[in-house]
């Protein structure tokens, strides 16, 4: 490699681990296992292969694929070649996919064979004629990096300030925006993860949440590679397979979104699987209902739980609630990680007293450089050196943060503001409820009516009057839902985040 060896680059994280522990297993996926030396060499071959496609420093390379070793290698190869990786949600179709490709200006799309037809149709409409296979045939990236005769002589100049990735926001409340993540921001965040989450090289982590999402890639995959851990990668968070692997491979660390923790806690295989190796469990990417967390901690008293909170723009980890804090503050998302500074302000930008709600702002070297091609959104989000998160929180005297709601999800009913999360937590205490989402819907009398969408547990029953009465016993009258609609499922993206904008459209 010809990169500056002193540069703080994403691929340098792997390269240094390969120098320390070349023969240690870095990654297993399906029937393949990669040592650190093999994985590092594969990344170099992948970088050369990408350069041979005519790509130059700063060009954007989109990736559309499910979890695989090829997907990881592609990301690191882009980093090593000085290219900007653009991860795409593999569930997107049509206009949603076209929007991200067009916004990012991607010149090339790396794609799984199973998604090639979807990608080809969208790319044809955008004039993108270079679709390259991630895996599955002799011309794919995976086949190339496994070829011992393929060149690994990378010629690239990559600096810490170069962009490594465009991380598109989840689009839960508006159109996705491309957060410009530099190498330096990401690597700085990796150190915050190591310190806040107590990672060790012997944790034997299992990663199954989508790698296109910043949590799986940048809170777990890369930080664990940076310290030489052996990682088990699964294609998807299939609960049956997750439980089998924990037992078979003595997995010690597991990150899941709350939408996966809930079915895992209720899975029949728990009665037969040996999970004694599991020492650390992390949750995040969406809010974990307190009642669900309490059930998990009661069922697994020996597992150390960590609440991970943040957002794409901060790379993404901002705060962590550590295991020793869960008993006293189960609803909190913890305190800021090492490289993140926070403050909580009102609508006028004044800091609010402890205990009062306000927007949480971040100042950190982990932050993105702004939004790709959107100067107006960048200016609105970054003011006086602080990033405005859009999250409404409270902070206590010891600095612990508790999320109240997304600011756009706060409901104005009759001129009084109601946090949708508070109503959701009250509904979750009903034994028949599996999932719930609360939004405000237009109402001539109330401005917005508190409206609940409820998914019932299998075999359970309840009606609107019963659910309203249940909340009425627990909250003030103005917070009680005016309407309750029972649905089969709630709209979520692949990382488990609830898409309330879809519920608003439906309502």
Image (spheres, grey):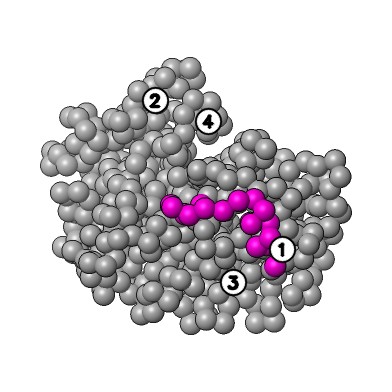
Quote the CA–CA distance across marks 1 and 4: 40 Å
**Residues in magenta?**
456-473
Closest to the camera, between mark 1 and mark 4, is 1
Report the disc number at residue 335: none
Q: Choose mark 4 or mark 3, whichever is in front.
A: 3
Q: Earlier in the sequence, mark 2 or mark 4?
A: 4
Residue at label 1?
Answer: 472
Mark 3 or 1: the one toward you: 1
Q: Residue 223: name its quadrant.
A: bottom left
Residue tagged 2: 118
Residue 371: x and y, percent? 61, 43
Q: Position of residue 469 (x, y in %)?
A: 68, 60
Q: Position of residue 446 (x, y in %)?
A: 84, 48
Residue 273 vertical placement versus 384 (above, below) = below
Q: CA distance from mark 2 to mark 4?
A: 12 Å
SS category of the residue bearing label 4 = helix
Q: Which image quarter: residue 260?
A: bottom left
Residue contact at pointers 3 and 1, CB within 8 angstroms: no
Which of the labelled discs sits on residue 96, or is there none? 4
Note whether 470 is above or below 168 in the view shown. below
Mark 4 vs 3, N-terminal side: 4
Sequence-wise, the earlier of marks 2 and 3 is: 2
Query: Which class describes the residues within 10 Å of circle 3: few (<14), some (14-19), or many (20+)?
Result: many
What distance separates the C-alpha of mark 3 from that of mark 1? 24 Å
Residue at the (74%, 50%) spot, across then down: 482
- The residue that mark 3 highlights is 332
The local crowd at label 2, few if under 14, some if 14 to 19, many if 20 or more residues have their Cα within 10 Å, is some
Quarter of the image containing the C terminus? top right
Residue 94 in the image, given as x and y percentages of width and height: 49, 25
């Amino acid at each position: 490699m010809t990169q500056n060896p002193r540069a703080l680059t994403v691929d340098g994280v792997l390269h240094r681990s390969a120098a320390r522990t070349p023969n240690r297993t870095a990654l297993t996926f399906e029937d393949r296992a990669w040592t650190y030396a093999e994985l590092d060499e594969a990344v170099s071959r992948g970088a050369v292969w990408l350069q041979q496609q005519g790509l130059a420093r700063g060009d954007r390379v989109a990736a559309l694929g499910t979890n695989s070793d090829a997907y990881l290698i592609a990301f690191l190869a882009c980093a090593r070649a000085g290219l900007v990786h653009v991860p795409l949600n593999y569930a997107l179709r049509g206009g949603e996919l076209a929007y991200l490709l067009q916004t990012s200006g991607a010149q090339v799309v790396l794609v799984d064979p199973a998604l090639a037809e979807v990608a080809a149709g969208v790319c044809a409409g955008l004039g993108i004629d270079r679709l390259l296979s991630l895996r599955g045939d002799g011309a794919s990236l995976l086949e190339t990096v496994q070829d011992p005769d393929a060149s690994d002589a990378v010629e690239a100049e990559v600096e810490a300030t170069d962009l490594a990735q465009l991380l598109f926001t989840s689009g839960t409340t508006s159109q996705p925006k491309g957060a410009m993540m530099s190498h330096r921001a990401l690597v700085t965040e990796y150190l915050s993860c190591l310190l806040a989450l107590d990672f060790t090289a012997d944790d034997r982590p299992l990663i199954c949440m989508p790698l296109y999402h910043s949590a799986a890639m940048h809170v777990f995959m890369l930080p664990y590679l940076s310290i030489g851990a052996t990682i088990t990668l699964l294609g998807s968070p299939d609960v049956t397979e997750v439980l089998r692997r924990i037992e078979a491979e003595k997995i010690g660390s597991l990150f899941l979104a709350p939408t996966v923790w809930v079915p895992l806690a209720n899975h029949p295989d728990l009665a037969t699987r040996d999970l004694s190796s599991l020492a650390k469990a992390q949750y995040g990417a969406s809010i974990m209902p307190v009642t669900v967390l309490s059930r998990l901690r009661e069922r697994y008293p020996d597992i150390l739980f960590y609440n991970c909170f943040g957002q794409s723009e901060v790379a993404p980890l901002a705060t962590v609630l550590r295991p020793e804090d869960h008993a006293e503050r189960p609803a909190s998302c913890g305190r800021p990680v090492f490289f993140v500074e926070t403050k909580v302000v009102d609508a006028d930008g004044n800091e609010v007293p402890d205990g009062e709600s306000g927007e949480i702002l971040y100042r950190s070297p982990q932050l993105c450089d702004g939004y790709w091609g959107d100067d107006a959104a960048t200016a609105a989000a970054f003011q006086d050196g602080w990033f405005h998160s859009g999250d409404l929180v409270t902070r206590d005297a010891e600095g612990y943060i508790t999320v109240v709601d997304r600011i756009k999800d706060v409901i104005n009913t009759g001129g009084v503001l109601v946090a949708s999360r508070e109503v959701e937590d009250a509904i979750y205490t009903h034994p028949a409820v599996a999932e719930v989402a609360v939004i405000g819907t237009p109402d001539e009398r109330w401005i917005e009516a508190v409206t609940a969408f409820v998914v019932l547990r299998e075999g359970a029953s309840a009606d609107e009057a019963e659910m309203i009465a249940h909340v009425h016993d627990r909250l003030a009258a103005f917070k009680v839902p005016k309407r309750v609609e029972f649905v089969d499922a709630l709209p979520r993206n692949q990382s488990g985040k609830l898409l309330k904008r879809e519920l608003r459209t439906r309502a």
